[in-house]
Image (cartoon, grey):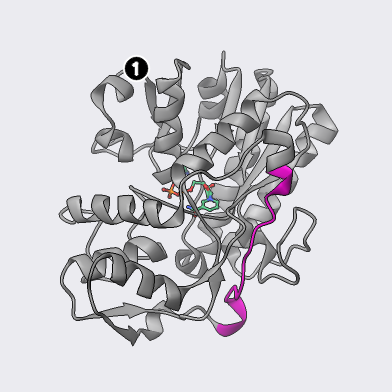
Amino acid sequence: MTGADGFIGSHLAEELTRRGVKVRALVMYNSFGRSGWLDSSPPELAGSMEILAGDIRDPHAMVELTAGIDVVFHLASLVAIPFSYLSPDNYVKTNVIGTLNMLQAARTNGVKKFVHTSTSEIYGSAGHVPMDESHPQNAHSPYAATKIAADQLALSYLRSFSLPVTVVRPFNTYGPRQSARAIIPTIISQIASGAASIRLGNLDPTRDFTYVSDVVVGFIAAAERPDLEGEVIHLGSGSEISIGELVSRIAALMKSEVEIVSDARRMRPQSSEVDRLVCDNSKAARLLEWSPKVEFEKGLRRTIQWVQDNLDHPGYRPDRYVI
Ligand SMILES: NC(=O)c1ccc[n+]([C@@H]2O[C@H](COP(=O)([O-])OP(=O)(O)OC[C@H]3O[C@@H](n4cnc5c(N)ncnc54)[C@H](O)[C@@H]3O)[C@@H](O)[C@H]2O)c1
């Protein structure tokens, strides 16, 4: 799998290993020998994985990576929307060319299943709710545009070369290990660091949040179930909450009273903002027998606990705006 060093990928790699699956985990190469969040995995899990460092932008290395592999879970991606405004070229190279390299490598090695990771960001703002898989696509950011391109490449490899591709499309996912730039960790880490006021962008947009362990179960079902070639499947809760309400909810759980300060740097350009996302998850229920199990309050409590326990992690600097 790719992106095994990341938030969702590390949880997926751990859960597959727990289930006795042999995992070859690609982590992004760096000269420090770090494997991202897999460095925080229980040793009995990380120790049972084959962890390889590399880069999906290298087509030759990806052929070697996928040799002898039955199922590819492709999660590696640049994911931050604000950074995609600054470095769109990098997003094309990673999300589009990187995905092409993975598809081509999987094809070369005759893998039996390719689970590609999309995102609800590809829709832009909801035209109707709940949003099913046929909702029109409208890229509001370079990130979203590259994910649309990657999805289409993946599906084209099924139609053109019979590569058995299934596309999993998560809505907003949250939980332990999520980057501090994402909205839920941003709110929690600022409150947990004792700030009297917390700095945020637009409070009006709504999002549909799913706890990471539920998303992981959806990925595994998409790989295990037969006859899903060419299917695009949403993973989301089906309920929405505005960012403003989210702050109140988290502050109440943390027994804190916070003042919100609007931070211009955290605002997206107005027409790039995604105002509303609400998932129709009925296809996942039908094809995967999937439904989210972790209630929002329970998931938030677990995430709050985790962020509080990890405030000294180098990735969490509540005093700084990290994109
Ligand atoms: N977190 C969410 O809310 C969410 C929602 C919908 C879709 N997704 C998708 O899920 C996937 C995982 O996202 P995440 O939230 O875990 O983000 P993440 O940033 O934690 O994980 C992405 C991983 O990809 C790796 N990566 C980046 N460029 C690479 C390269 N060139 N070569 C090899 N590895 C590279 C990074 O090291 C990182 O660990 C992404 O495809 C993302 O688009 C995430």
Q: Visible in this render: residue 117?
A: yes
Q: Is residue 271 magenta?
A: yes
Q: Residue at x 24, y 52 (%)?
A: 305
Position of residue 169 measured from the top left corner of the image (x, y, whole percent): 63, 48
The span picked out in magenta is 270-284
Question: Viewer-proximal residue, 132 or 8?
Answer: 132
Please identify the quarter of the rendering in which residue 315 is found.
bottom left
Horizontal and vertical percent position of residue 110: 69, 18
Confirm whether residue 59 shows in the render: no
Residue 3 located left or right of residue 200:
right
Kindly identify which residue carries mark 1.
Answer: 48
Q: Is residue 316 above or below residue 151?
A: below
| Residue at screen point 22% across, 63% down | 317
Please name the predominant secondary structure of the magenta segment in the image: loop
Residue at the image point whose x is 60% and y is 23% from the top? 71
Q: Please say if 111 is above or below 310.
A: above
Quarter of the image for residue 99 reads: top right
Instruction: Tell me how many marks there are.
Output: 1
Q: Please determine whether, in this image, residue 258 is positioned above or below residue 254.
A: below
